Amino acid sequence: MTVFSTWGTDGPSGAGAPISFSQDMPIRALMGWSGLIISDESVDIVDMTREYAARARAESCGQCFPCRMGTEEMAEIMERICDGRGVMEDIDRLEAVAGYVHESSRCDIGLTSPHPILDAIYSFRDRFVEAIREAKPVPRGEYVCQVTAPCISACPTRVNIPGYVEKIRMRHWDEAIKIVRDTCCMPGTIGRVCVKDCEFKCKRGAIDEPIAIRHLKRVAADMELKAGGASVPEKPLKDEKAAIVGAGPAGLSCAYYLGLKGYRSTIFEALPEPGGMAAVGIPDYRLPRDILRGEAAMVEAVGAEIRYSVKVGEDITIPQMLEQGYRAVFIAAGAPNSSAMGCEGEDAGYRGYMPGVEFLRKVAFGEKPLSGRKILVIGGGNVAMDCVRSARRLGFTDVNLLYRRTEKEMPADPFEIADSKDEGVKFHTLVAPVKIHASGGRVTALECVRMILGRPDASGRRKPIPEEKSNFLMDCDAIVPAIGQSCEVDRFAPEGIGVNKNRTLAVDPVTMRSSVPYIFGGGDCVTGPSTLVAALAAGRRAARSIMDYLETGDSAPRPEDWLDKAVSSLSRPGHSDDAPFAVLTHRHHPPMTDPETRIHSFAEVEGCLSPAEAGQEAGRCLRCYRIAIAALR
Amino acid sequence: MAEITITINGEKVVAEEGRTILEAAKKAGYYIPTLCHMDGLKPLGVCRICVVKVDSASGLIPACNTRIYKGMRVVTEDEDILSARRSVLRLILSNHPNNCMVCEKNGRCELETLAHKYLPAGEITSDWGRAKNNYPIEDNNPLIEWDRNKCIMCSRCVRTCNEIVVRGAIGCDTVKGFTAIADIPKDKDSSLADCELCGQCIAACPTGALMGKREKLCGRSWDLKKVRTTCPYCGTGCNIDLYVNPKTNRVVKAEGSKEGPVNWGRTCVKGRFGYEFVHSTERITTPLIKKDGEFVPATWDEAYDLIAGKFKEIKEKYGPDSLGVFACSRSVNEDNYLLTKLARAVFGTNNVDNCARVCHAPSVAGLSAVFGTGAATNSFDQISGGDVLFVTGSNTTEAHPIIGMNIKRAVKNGAKLIVADPRRIEIVKHADYFLPLRPGTNVALFSGLMHVIVKEGLHDKKFIEKRTKGFEAFSKNLEKFTPEYTARITGVSPSVIVEAARMMGEAKNLMIYYSLGITEHAWGTQGVMSLGHLALLTGSVGRPSTGVNVLRGQNNVQGACDMGALPDIFIGYQKVADPAVREKFGKAWGAKMPETVGLRSTDMLDMMADKRIRGFYILGEDPAHTDPDISHIRKNLGALDFLVVQEMFMTETAKFAHVVLPASSFAEQNGTYANGERRIQLVNQAIPPLSGKENWQVICDVMERMGYDGPKYSHASEIFDEMTKVAEHFIGGCTWEGLREKGIQWPCPPGSKGTATMYTERFSPHPDGLGIFTPIDFKEPSEWPDSEYEFILSTGRRREHYNNGSMTRRTGIYKVWDHETVEMNPYDATRLNIIDGEKVRVVSRRGEVSVKAAVTDKSPIGTVWMSFHYQDALTNLVTNSTYDSVVKCPEYKVCAVRVEKLG
């Protein structure tokens, strides 16, 4: 229950958004960039203001004068009051300084951090007066703090984006990459193929174009490679070790963060190659295998062992792992199976028919699994795009993509769609497959039906409905469905473990722990097919819980998890979201191999911005940092 | 840029689109205070003192980094704005020391000015109860004192060091928040460890946090007299402001002149701190006559009588061609012009030359052969527009620091850089391609690059067809310079040659920069021509931000050549061989002009030994220090019947003189210099000449004593006026006053405003107006290492010194490099068991010199390197006097030596 809120308002009314935190969240009060929310009246607002001012001071980067000196002034005044040394003029001075910092600072730290402080003075002035009058030290409470930004909150790994972007602006490449690795251990990979939710939330995007956050990460990673690769910190090794199922992004991430703390781990991987779906699902022209191998090698260097071509459930079972001394198991087996299309003939074993996942896997191992002139790929996601673009490179001259909704609804990255079109892929929308026609055991054509869009379905997208009597035939030499993937965790997980309806592993969303105390899970095998960056985040979160479990025998959410959850639920309304006076700028686009050339090989298409261009691009960042603290029960 | 209308304080103002509010307001005459903003730096918008109100925003907006838009309404001052300005000043002053009384910046401090302007009197000195910082004063830098307590964190010094100097000696990233302060960059252990002492941070500092150590207590700022003049060091031609304390008549400080058209306020270590020699106690201030081997002070009359008598005697006895004049590339044009007159009209000989002979004579010859004129084709400020820069044979960041900074900044802003140099010099760090060629193989490398450009069809066919001739034979000759063949000669890998050539071939604007690494070879003229060909081949000449740009070594070496201090030409490159020209000058100067082309300085020096040259006049040159194989030079100078040296200091050469006349320094002179981009700029007198006479007065006196009845001048400007009349096609459009603001780039015939970019229409000095391709073959240097002399010795310059060092060794800069070293690769050093700093002997077939070894991988294996700035370690005892085949420039850059351990 919220008893008081100024969230999203500019005044002392207490009539802010009535944000309430769910019962299981032990938050008594929250001070943040857009106001003050109190659920428990007994919280000491004076002490909390002191804490907030101290945090603001600590986060001020020191570049613009009002914030650098003003946050110092605010923190000092609050410290004085809470030490019992305050004088009455301090309140007015605090108000004046906070007002000045609020109106004159350059970035969101200075612009927003006075907000809750001013709210506190306006609404609870009597308590400040009382604290000064009593002239006694105010007891210090305990708080958790989070420094975030719209881009940071959008990223599952919570990587400090403005932080590394600023280091790139200063050309401190090593520091930039270090900041990325703090929470995201595969910068070269993610810097190439991330779905970049951050860029969609970038405030720069509201003014002109979002910062090239993903690409900047890649530049930093490339610069590190150029400089001779990363160095691995020395650390004492611990006795406990963990087993990890799957060397995909989630597994590698978990092993990396375990390794950083000295915990050894062994990764059991079914493929002869690290990277999981990133290796065999993402073609080389987007993500060169060397990059992935290099980053896996980095994971090994921090203390993980990868055993290739080991099928968990067949070559080794989870109980056997325990016998071998592994005290915890992280399941990150991915979702390597293709979903069925529900189309006649798809199980008939025709030559020329191959599910997208399998097709990409074979291509990844250098095979040419399909041949001919004309190919049909069904689906509208990134996997479908990978399939059409790979097919183009395998020599198919007539490459077609079929999708049952319109291009607007395609889940694939718009850049991928554009790149596919540049490479000559033909798009057929509002079309769904009905039946595969074959002759002599070989596909010859696909019977399709035209679709129309009906009302929005559960996903919010308009539901496609078949148009009657609109069936037609499309001749082809090959058919590749790419409409989804699935997994079957129950195939090797111990009996009795909690499994979801779609055969994914059921885990606690914060601790990643399953119903079996020593088994943790993350990545696609928990969420169903999802993003690479989500898998990296899950791996890291699991690593933290596994370490808790190895040290204490238990793993539970930490206070900062609650704050993170609360912050994620807060949108940030208010005037400072629009910034009409920032200078209009243009995003730098990396060089791309032209379509004529690139369709002839699997060489990487996207080039790298030069250091100078990267520096300029980084200079576009608005540094929308903001601070939240919470008083917990 | 389109013009748009905005409203400032209710008044309609027209301004260029894309400008900031600050720029528009300033132009319209509205004052907006600034602290973190500085012209030349990107606006940062951190101090927030420049806040203004804009109609469509609720808060206060910084004026320095907000661009204007059509119809924008701006208020530059009201109560809210003043209140915000007061707030920030109060916050700054809350921990700023109040000891203005003892601060050197007092009176010029921007914080002080703003505090007095905006705060009520009582508030300026009252603090908010916070303790002042107590940082120790950093004073381990030889020239700069750093008091961080006065730092207000505007980061102007940091940005200057990173954006303008591109050096990064100061950073501000070690801490954050309130304690953030300008600091040394991470991983450097001492303050200003990487500092190149350019002093620009001092100029950038709005308060007294950064100060020049040697400028302290030299007078309060408002008492000093400022005189804008041109720097007396390298050929960049920076404008500097000299500050003179009128009470002592001493130059107490130099700063970059903000209006200087070359440097816009920027300076290097020499321009900023290199003025102290002016007041050196070692200055020669009276004439000296050598009696029994000792110099004895004499009156001007005694000296003049002796000089006139001796020269007349030699002329009568042995003919005018037994006399010669060595003009001065470091003194003003007016002096050089008069010296050519002294030689031609008074002595009656064309035996006049200047030290371009030993540096850039190949440039004059080589560029003339290709383009028609022997000078840089473009302007320094066009560097920012080049997309590919090719720097070769130039240690730009050391020898021409301001140009080096411009190049580094262009690269930082996205330009590509290719460097070809035997040594891993500083600028290589910024290069996209580094071509470490073997010394002396320039022509082969350039031919190899052009081979690739032609082979891949990247040459500018249209340009070649329309504006050049000789391409066919030329390209045929290129055929053998395949990347592999070139690689065998130069040692540069074939793939790098190919890639660099492609980058050049594909460049929109290729700018070529070179210096003595190209000219000072036996095959130097050919090297210069090859670079000219490269420009023709890629169509990179005749447009802004292209061209072949020679970096001239001395402040007025361009001018000395322009003035005709060369044996075959008169002022403005008018040929001695042309009877009409001779007649014109005969009339103008009132004497018959000698017909035969004179001797080059290197020839004259050679001919002293066999008495074909008997009398010699030298102004400010020091061949006994700077010419190669000086044992030989010494013998020759010693054989002269009569030598007059006009000098500031007792140099190696002056020691051989029979009469030494005092010379005035740049600070004592009026006159003009021409810099490396052909810009003629004023040199303005800051203090009266220490000897009582400017150089031109002395030269006129000598001419008069010899019986010449020339015009009587009362000021150097009158000499300049005469010059514009006798070289009308060249500088006829110049006036003395017209030079005051930005100088003039020649050619400037009457009615012209000067020429920033040459050859935009045609290569006009060539009769057909076409650029000329000439096939060139590669030739090996004349002396190559062998078993006895196993190293190549190459020589060059250091940033902190200049030429023979007679000036820089008498300033505070001297401490930075106070001794000569020989740089050698660690591999060679280990092999010879030599450790860094150990004293060694460098021996060639001609001589030897003992210096300390500096072990560094800047030098490639097999090559050692020395400068030549030190009188106590004369590098030129060792160097080779083999000459360039065309113009007799010596091969300073390659000779064979061995390095011996001492003891």
Image (cartoon, coloured by chain):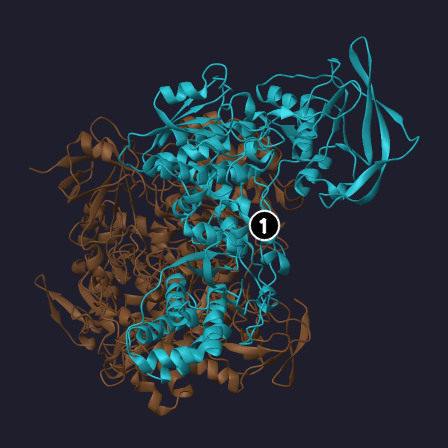
Chain colours: A cyan, B brown
Subunit of label 1: A
Q: Is residue B876 left or right of residue A331?
A: left
* Crowd tier of the residue under label 1, counting other residues whose Cα lies within 10 Å: few below 14, some 14–19, many 20 or above: many
Vertical position of residue A445 compared to residue B580: above or below: above
- Quadrant assignment for the C terminus of chain B: top left
Residue positioned most to the right: A469
| Helix, strand or loop at mark 1 | helix
Residue positioned most to the bottom: B121
Residue A462 visible at all: yes
Q: Which residue is tagged 1?
A: A199
Q: Residue A12: horizontal and vertical position, in percent?
A: 53, 76
Question: Which quarter of the picture shows residue B545?
Answer: bottom right
Vertical position of residue B113 compared to residue B352: above or below: below
Between residue A78 and residue B309, name the one nearer to us.
Answer: A78
Residue B727 visible at all: no
Q: Residue A510: horizontal and vertical position, in percent?
A: 48, 43
Question: Which quarter of the picture shows residue B340?
Answer: bottom left
The residue under label 1 is which amino acid type? Glu
Q: Residue B40: horizontal and vertical position, in percent?
A: 47, 66
Image point 65% across, 76% down: which residue? B72
Residue positioned most to the top: A440
Q: Is residue B302 left or right of residue B605?
A: left
- Quadrant assignment for the N terminus of chain B: bottom right
